[in-house]
Image: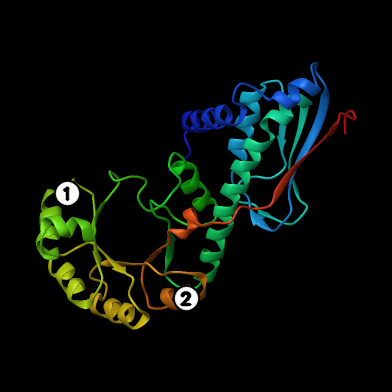
Amino acid sequence: MSLVASDIRKIVKHALEEDLGSGDLTTRLLFPKFIRAEATIQTKQEAILAGLPMATVVFKQVDPKLKFKPLAQDGDRLKPGMIIARLEGDGRSLLKGERVALNFLQHLSGIATLTARFVETVKGTMAVILDTRKTTPGLRALEKYAVRMGGGRNHRMNLSDGILIKDNHLALAGSLKAVVERAKKNAPRGFKVEAETTNRSEVEEALAAKADVILLDNMSLPQLKEAVRLINGRALTEASGGVHLNNLREIAETGVDFISIGALTHSAPAVDMSMDIIPFKGAR
């Protein structure tokens, strides 16, 4: 699942319209004429980089004549003080694109960095780190891309990507076993049926209905261990709910196949980055 260029352009266009409004009033008043300048974008902390394609498009949309030279690539591990891009052109254009470009870089690098911490914590186990649909409206494609840059894997991009039977489906449809059987009977070819469970009884129902994936929701460690033993390879297993870095390793060591974490996209802290603009000093 790759980023689509048209999606990036559309998202960036909306972000610039939101930020510029009717125009950069301060810059227009201070600099009525072209002023040649150069700039660097750098990180102030260790991070996994994500968002360079978005930053590139930001400055291209602001001013196609700007030169943008990336010095790193998404997925790279950054150290404090590293310069990730150099820019050259009209200083007014640099000022107009600065905040939007940094917003994308800081937010997406934050997601990639947090994801990498989760991925590193489960290293050596069979568990794969998954994201969820708990994303910022309108930014899902970008945020899930950032998860991939951090070494995680995407769960469903949208509701048409997979079949996941949750508690509110059951509230409308009846018993877990019957609902799973119905879903498997009517599922399009190639689609797995996943069922959310919260206790041993529901796990047994999901197994009886031959669910392909069983989600173990908000279970304690003893419950997870018991569920994995009970399932015994008859279905894939996914742990979810109440997962954080402090208990992640223990959850992974229960033997689950996947661990899904909403915090990757809804609670990742932004990476501290800055853009410094100076008058043009000539060729380097």
Quadrant in which residue 41 is drawn: top right
Work out whether mark 2 precedes mark 1 in sequence or the reverse, and give the earlier one.
1
Q: Residue at x 16, y 59 (%)?
A: 171
Classify mark 2: helix, strand or loop: helix
Kind of residue at disc 1:
Ala
The x and y percentages for residue 164 are 25, 55
Is disc 1 surrounded by few (<14), some (14 to 19) or many (20+) residues within 10 Å?
Answer: some
Asked whether residue 91 appears in the rendered view, the answer is yes
Q: Nearer the viewer, residue 232 or 242?
A: 242
Kind of residue at disc 2:
Asn
Residue 44's tag is none
| The C terminus: image quadrant | top right
Tell me: 188 left or right of 221: left
Q: Residue at x 21, y 77 (%)?
A: 200
Is disc 2 surrounded by few (<14), some (14 to 19) or many (20+) residues within 10 Å?
Answer: few
Q: Quick one: which residue is furthest to the top in this view?
A: 33
The x and y percentages for residue 112 are 56, 54
Q: Quick one: which residue is furthest to the right in this view?
A: 281
Say above or below: 158 vs 151. Answer: above
Classify mark 1: helix, strand or loop: loop
Quadrant in which residue 62 is drawn: top right
Tell me: 245 left or right of 48: left
Q: Contact (CB < 8 A) between labels 2 and 1?
A: no
Give the residue number, with chain letter if any, for mark 1. 187
The x and y percentages for residue 110 are 59, 53
Say above or below: 15 vs 162. Answer: above
| The N terminus: image quadrant | top left
Give the residue number, with chain letter if any, for mark 2. 247
Say above or below: 243 vs 21. Answer: below
The x and y percentages for residue 165 are 22, 57
Q: Residue at x 17, y 76 (%)?
A: 201
Asked whether residue 184 appears in the rendered view, the answer is no
